[in-house]
Amino acid sequence: MKNVAAYMLANLGGQGGSVESCTAILGSVGCEVDSEKLGALCASLEGKDIIEVLAAGRAKMSTMPAGGAAAGGDAPAAAKEPEPEPEEEEEDMGFDLFD
């Protein structure tokens, strides 16, 4: 995620998404730079419009199920929890325990 964030910041800053600009951004905030992963990210995004890449990712995510849906869709609905019984009020017996 930090590599993607650095790439996005470099693009927003007009520096392009080069490994050097991303390394400078990550180094400025004290992050360790994994050159291999950063290089792979920059190579995979080279020559692509970042707005189109984001739009494609958003379209893919819209097809993913969300909300913790169960894998077994045929499972019966969860049984309704029984309502707790109302507590009985204490009767005044004419004395106090702490008198």
Image (cartoon, rainbow, N blue to C red):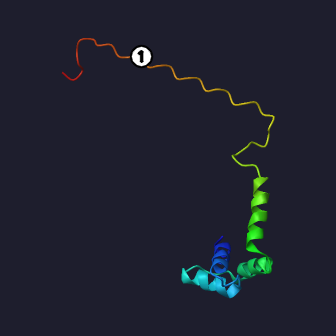
Q: Position of residue 48 (x, y in %)?
A: 79, 76
The residue at the point 71 percent across, 80 percent down is 38
**Residue type (three-letter) at the residue carrying disc 1:** Glu
Q: Which quarter of the rendering shows the C terminus?
A: top left
**Residue 76 sits in quarter:** top right
Q: Is residue 78 above or below residue 59?
A: above
55 relative to 15 in the view: left or right? right
The residue at the point 72 percent across, 30 percent down is 77
**Residue 58 sits in quarter:** bottom right
17 relative to 24 in the view: left or right? right
User: Circle 1 sits in a helix, a strand or a loop, which is it?
Assistant: loop
**Camera-side residue: 17 or 3?**
17
98 relative to 87 in the view: left or right? left
Q: Which quarter of the rendering shows the N terminus?
A: bottom right
The residue at the point 29 percent across, 13 percent down is 92
94 relative to 89 in the view: left or right? left
Name of the residue lying farthest toward the left:
99
**Camera-side residue: 6 or 82?**
6
Q: How many marks?
A: 1
Name of the residue lying farthest toward the bottom:
20
Q: Position of residue 30 (x, y in %)?
A: 54, 81
Few, some or many residues within 10 Å of mark 1 (<14, 14–19, 20+): few
**Residue 54 sits in quarter:** bottom right
The residue at the point 75 percent across, 57 percent down is 61
Q: Position of residue 18 (x, y in %)?
A: 71, 85
Q: Which residue is mark 1?
A: 88
Q: Is residue 72 above or below residue 85?
A: below
